[in-house]
Amino acid sequence: MGRLFGTDGVRGVANADLTAEMALGLSVAAAHVLAEAGTFEGHRPVAVVGRDPRASGEFLEAAMVAGLASAGVDVLRVGVLPTPAVAHLTGALDADLGVMLSASHNPMPDNGIKFFARGGHKLADELEDRIETTYRAHASGEPWDRPTGGGVGRVRDYDEGFDAYVAHLVGVLPNRLDGLKVVIDGAHGAAARVSPEAFARAGAEVVTIGTDPDGLNINDGYGSTHLARLQAAVVEHRADLGIAHDGDADRCLAVDAVGREVDGDQILAVLALAMREAGELRGDTVVGTVMSNLGFKLAMKREGVELVQTAVGDRYVLEEMKSRGYALGGEQSGHVIVLDHATTGDGTLTGLLLAARVAATGRTLADLAGVMERLPQVLVNVPDVDKSRVSSSGDVAAAVAEAERELGETGRVLLRPSGTEPLVRVMVEAADIEQARSVAGRLADAVKSALG
């Protein structure tokens, strides 16, 4: 049986992989593990529970709340709010635990459970492992130690969470957004109310699409993975920019005034220079991943900003930021972490800060994003190979060296074994798309020949 917790909590098809019984069992297990770790010592424990609008979130929330309360944890139910809102409220309310029910950008049938520790930070891997072990033990019949009488947890709705989170977002902006027209695509997800409200309170004229969740339409043709409608709306409404979120609003992509995509690398570049100008970019360093576009790396080098690269995944970006004290990091996908104001990627905050830079400078988003040239990037998956030998094969190393000689300083090669499938991902960047495709094709053939 595989590990329940992945890189971003527990996910699966709701009511098939992820059931009400599992949600209840994991919530009780989490309460017991945190109690044993001393998290609840000396006070009644409190948990913040939120969700995105998926229909399955309704029964999963009920199961999660029931489990926590049955284990003696008082629950503040904040309803439909973004993942970073739950993280923020967990810290702001000094809660012992935060729980978010969401499968982010995944299709509607999926759902997930993500735990936050006190302060709104990601739960440590060691605690996730202990929760899973405890859950499995009791799922097979071991009885729980259950409180009775006044020892059971109490449950109440915390409707103030919406306003508290929006006020936090607006309060950290360096300047207002008066004079800007912004189109917000909420992906029919957790930011459908929050993001338009925050932009409006900050002074922007707001046009909305993808902000009518019905429990079934999350991420369906809208949001950061489907930008076409946002691109059309920005042009139609003659807006200054557009902002797209994913289902749980921990990421943000943007669209400039003529409908061109502005990806996470470009957003990071704009924010890095703004934060350095304000004296907020600690160490004049930004954290990205090995998949950051080479154009981003070259731009940061030209501007005197150091780029530290990690493995792919916002969790690795966050770990590097926290361990080294950096203030800004993120991924091409739009997960951007501004650690002075958030403990996780926050799509609404990212969009607000990007719009604030446009408003403060009087420059267009296209002009600001032009600080970097996004080089063509080609990704080829090579299936049915021995991925464990990708770093030790002499033939693969020779093919990579030949490709790197051909590309020189204006290109890049990256080979990555998949974490879940028997395949190797070949990524090539070059100044010319045809050259990138040609080099990627030859490398893919070399990998298949050497490792197949």
Image (cartoon, rainbow, N blue to C red):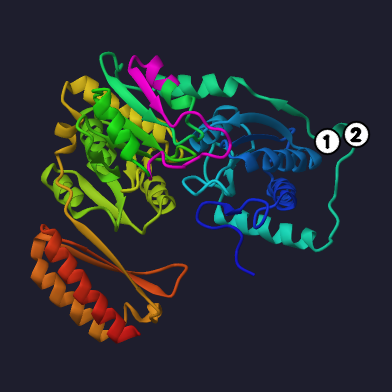
* Observer-nearest of 313 and 106: 106
> Where is residue 226 shown, x and y percent of the image?
37, 43
Location of residue 136 with respect to 338 vertically, above or below: below
| Camera-side residue of 389 and 105 | 105
Q: Which numbered disc covers residue 149?
A: 2
| Region rendered in magenta | 197-225
- Residue for badge 1: 152
Q: Quadrant of residue 328?
A: top left
Lateral position of residue 358 relative to residue 249, left or right: left
Type of the residue with mark 1: Val
Give the quarter of the image for residue 53: top right
Question: Who's the residue at 9% across and 65% down the image?
Answer: 408
Q: Looking at the image, do the residues carrying marks 1 and 2 touch, with CB atoms under 8 Å apart?
A: yes
* Nearer the observer, 218 or 38: 218
| Labels in figure, total | 2
Q: Any magenta on residue 6?
A: no
Circle 2: element type: helix
In the displayed structure, 403 sits above or below 131; it is: below
Q: Who's the residue at 33% across and 84% down the image?
A: 451
Camera-side residue: 222 or 261? 222
- The reply to whether the magenta stretch includes residue 215 is yes
